[in-house]
Image (cartoon, coloured by chain):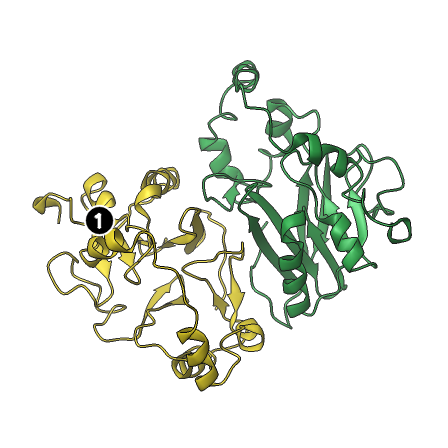
Chain colours: A yellow, B green
Amino acid sequence: MGSSSSFSSSSKLLFRQLFEKESSTFTYLLADVSHQLWYLIDPVDKTVDRDLQLIDELGLKLIYAMNTHVHADHVTGTGLLKTKLPGVKSVCVTYVTGEEADQPNQEWLLPGMLYSSVVVGGLTFRVEALINSTSLYIHRQIFTLPEDTLIYPAHDYKGFEVSTVGEEMQHNPRLTKDKETFKTIMSNLNLSYPKMIDVAVPANMVCGLQDVPSQAN
Amino acid sequence: MGSSSSFSSSSKLLFRQLFEKESSTFTYLLADVSHQLWYLIDPVDKTVDRDLQLIDELGLKLIYAMNTHVHADHVTGTGLLKTKLPGVKSVCVTYVTGEEADQPNQEWLLPGMLYSSVVVGGLTFRVEALINSTSLYIHRQIFTLPEDTLIYPAHDYKGFEVSTVGEEMQHNPRLTKDKETFKTIMSNLNLSYPKMIDVAVPANMVCGLQDVPSQAN
């Protein structure tokens, strides 16, 4: 998979990676210019105004705000987006079963799928929602892709923005280990309790729509 | 100008943007795979180990560490790079007149030039060292480029990573103003005294080589 960061009126594809420093979250703006489909993937509440400004400057009409996973470190920007742009549809992965998520585009978001694909400008973007993921899953589903397939992360804490399947296969400090070693590493991470989790998870379970008037849902 | 963030053995070009959060500095890794030319542009001292790890993982042999301007907010990583990879050549813009900078590649770095070009993989990358820059200069030298020309910044404080000439022409909050208004805005910014300036500027005036043994220069 390749992508261009460029935007021009003749381009079929617009792809922009945006960064929120506090939670080290990447938000992605993805557009199929030919088909007038605009996605904002994993928006953060604190950077919604920035995202809206960019969308406005680029002359886009946002259709979908998509959340790829239940964020534990920040509140999704979807709720705010829907109040400011009422036409926006909320699309969440399958953890949301109620009315909070709008009708997903079944072509690229199917309940129960381990990943979803977005075909934009002739290129395929796969959102890897790593529910029940294991080293085995990653090896089977990701490491079988062409080695120059780009991997854009949901988060990064060291200033990296993109990687490739080939690099991860060779150098990922966890995924180059066998399954048992991987499980041991993950079990022994002893991560501190995420500061935002008690606020973020309940809000994100309803796609950030906890404060949105019902007519905007 | 377009670019691919991808790296593959068949690609002529490698381009990676890296971010240092504390000073909001972008470091760029740029390589012409065909001609074995590797540039690390605006490295930061605090992220040198990260950069070296990436260079190692990608199997690159770094040739040039380049500084596009006298950084006031961080110390360049060039000095550390030269101690850890003694073959690396330091290339600075023309503020460095002594022995600290290695012989610049005259093809793309000419004393007195307002910008420099790096031709990599058939694409032209211009480093805009905005010495004596004015709104007029930007209008003449940048806004005359094709509108889909990508602009990669040296710094960003809001989570943006890339823009285009067309976007800046239409939406840049300062450069869309006339020259006099631009000068007034810049004069009235009243920016606080940069925290790192007293340490960073003297170090960067010698390309970060103040602590490097002379044989490594």
Image position, residue B124 (x, y; %) = 67, 49
The front one of B211 and B207 is: B211
Image position, residue B46 (x, y; %) = 64, 49
The front one of A11 and B108 is: B108
Q: Residue at the spot x=47%, y=66% of the render?
A: A151
What kind of element bears circle 1?
A: loop
Q: Is residue A30 visible?
A: yes
Is B175 situated above or below B73? above
The residue under label 1 is A88
Q: Residue at the spot x=23%, y=55% of the render?
A: A204
Q: Residue at the spot x=90%, y=48% of the render?
A: B214
* Category of crowding for the residue at label 1, using alpha-carbon neighbours closer than 10 angstroms: few (below 14), some (14–19), many (at least 20): many
Question: For residue B158, which quarter of the picture?
Answer: top left
Q: How many marks?
A: 1
The front one of B208 and B163 is: B208
| Horizontal relation, residue A171 to residue B79: left or right | left
Q: Is residue B121 visible?
A: no
Q: Amino acid at mark 1?
A: Val
Image position, residue A198 (x, y; %) = 25, 54
| Horizontal relation, residue A3 to residue A129: left or right | right
Image position, residue A32 (x, y; %) = 36, 56
Q: What is the chain letter for disc 1?
A: A
| Horizontal relation, residue B137 to residue B176: left or right | right
Q: Residue at the spot x=60%, y=41% of the render?
A: B154
| Horizontal relation, residue B64 to residue A211: left or right | right
